Image (tube, grey):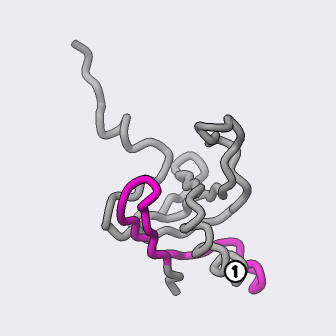
Amino acid sequence: MGNIEWNDLLSGGFIKLEDGKPKKLVLSNWKPQEKFKDEKTGELRKGITFTVLAEDDKVYEDEDSQKEYTVTAIRALVKLRPIIEKAEAAGKDFIKVNIVRVGEGRKTEYSISEVQ
């Protein structure tokens, strides 16, 4: 049997939201997502991919340590839109948000608020 580094394997370079647990993120470089496809149509799902500059109290200092966060849930995108548009209008290239996900599948709800 090999020694599997489970923590390293599961941590990955992406953000995973745990049910009901708040996650504070500093996000930048938002752009249309190009990874996740719709299971029924096979076409790309509409969404946004972000570079994560900080997660909770951890700051990612360089590109090698930064994570990625992709949002394809319409309910989450609706709440992110005014925060992103406000940042763009102010000439900012990042946003700070607090996100809480509750539920699974189509019943998933998101609470997303801007953090100053």
Query: Which segment did they paint magenta?
Result: 88-112
Q: Point out the image quarter for the N terminus.
A: top left
Q: From the viewer's side, name the closer residue of 39 and 3.
A: 39
Q: Check disc 1 and report the residue beneath it.
A: 87
Question: Which residue is rendered at x = 40% and y = 58% of the image?
Answer: 17
Does the segment drawn in magenta span residue 17?
Answer: no
Q: Is residue 37 above or below residue 50?
A: above
Which quarter of the picture shows residue 89? Answer: bottom right
- Residue 35 shown left or right of residue 55 in the figure: right
Residue 29, position as x, y percentages in the image: 69, 61
Question: Which residue is rendered at x = 71% and y = 72% of the image?
Answer: 93
In what element is the residue under mark 1?
Answer: helix
Amino acid type, residue under disc 1 in the picture: Ala
Q: Is residue 81 above or below residue 38?
A: below
Residue 69, position as x, y percentages in the image: 55, 55
Residue 16, position as x, y percentages in the image: 42, 53
Question: Which residue is rendered at x = 43% and y = 68% of the image?
Answer: 109
Residue 92, position as x, y percentages in the image: 71, 78
Which quarter of the picture shows residue 84? Answer: bottom right
Mark 1 Cα-neighbour bin, 10 Å: few <14, some 14–19, many ≥20: some
Question: Which residue is rendered at x = 40% and y = 65% of the image?
Answer: 101
